Amino acid sequence: MEDLLAQLRAAAEPTRLRLLSLCARGSFCVSDLCGILGQSQPRLSRHLKLLVEAGLLERMPEGANVFFHLPADADLVRQILARLPEEDPLLAADRRAAARLAAERARAASDAFRRHGADWDEMRALELPAAAIEAALVDILPGQIDRLLDIGSGTGRLLEVLAARCGSALGVDASREMLALARARLSERGLNHCAVRQADMYRLPLPDAGFDAVTLQMVLHYAEDPAAALAEAARVLKPGGSLLVVDLAPHARADLLGRHAHRWPGFDDAQLAGWLGAAGCALRQARSIDGPLAVRLWVAQRQPASLSVSTR
């Protein structure tokens, strides 16, 4: 009862209700929120601190910034927000300002990519059959996923594809420019149960066994140590959860190792099965998608600790 009362007291203030309403629609840093609400940083920081301490918001550090969003289990917040009048002039003005901010962030991130010549859409660059790969992804994963983690999520396309199947979804990526594009994508499509944050795939700032499914799409061939990346993905996966890897099958395209900075010329089933087994996962299914380069989908299941293979 004390926890509930503390959360109700934390939410019972006009500015904090506005903050919750905004963060229910996406992730924002303090400077974003200052611009939207027209209030000073010290004042908003105090409000945000109270909301975080009450468990109504989560902090996600990203470089010099900290982003705030609703936690996956924010049922009380959603019940409170459902009682706010949608036509309230103040809340409507906040939503318009947030939409302008999202559009500006997307434009800035896109401009940065164009200036630096970055080719962030690898599937298009390699002329891979994106639609067929996405359809196979939807088909091969379990019917409904409570909590999904997408490692190396880039511009958030996979989160968008799987959003309807997830109770909540988190994407992690090392690139701040990618994250800016992903936030804009998710905001534009109203995917408020999806969020992104900056993270290193070898050291995820996430608890053990926190997700029902973990995906790595076109990520592993960039990894210096694929076995370590898979072990870290398995660590945050619940026993019985699904680990899905989408990557290139073995190929002879030496140019990809130079021009596209690939570390690995694709992977075969034996490689993946060995790394997954060492990470405590059992390979359950593999599927191929034909194209200019063959793409392989591997689905593994996290084994209970008693069945996991020790690597010591």
Image (cartoon, grey):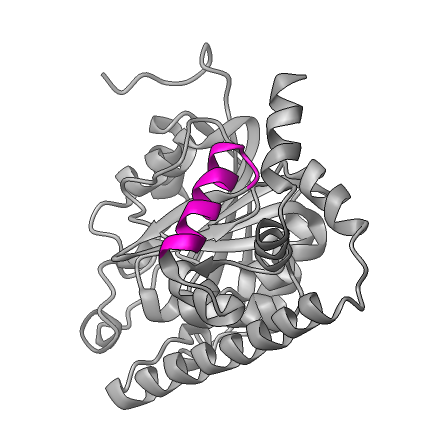
Q: Up-down: is 25 above or below 57?
A: below
Residue at horizontal 50 percent and vertical 17 percent from the top: 304
Residue 51 colored magenta?
yes
Where is residue 297? Give x, y as percent: 51, 52
Where is residue 59? Give x, y as percent: 42, 45
Q: Quadrant of the C terminus?
A: top left
Magenta region, mostly helix, strand or loop?
A: helix
Q: Is residue 300 visible?
A: yes
Magenta stretch? 42-56
Where is residue 278? Give x, y as percent: 33, 27
The quarter of the displayed image where residue 63 is located: bottom left
The quarter of the displayed image where residue 164 is located: bottom right
Q: Most extreme residue toward the top, as rendered? A: 306
151 on left or right of 84: left
Residue 227 colored magenta?
no
- Name the one closer to the observer, 42 or 161: 42
Where is residue 275? Give x, y as percent: 33, 35
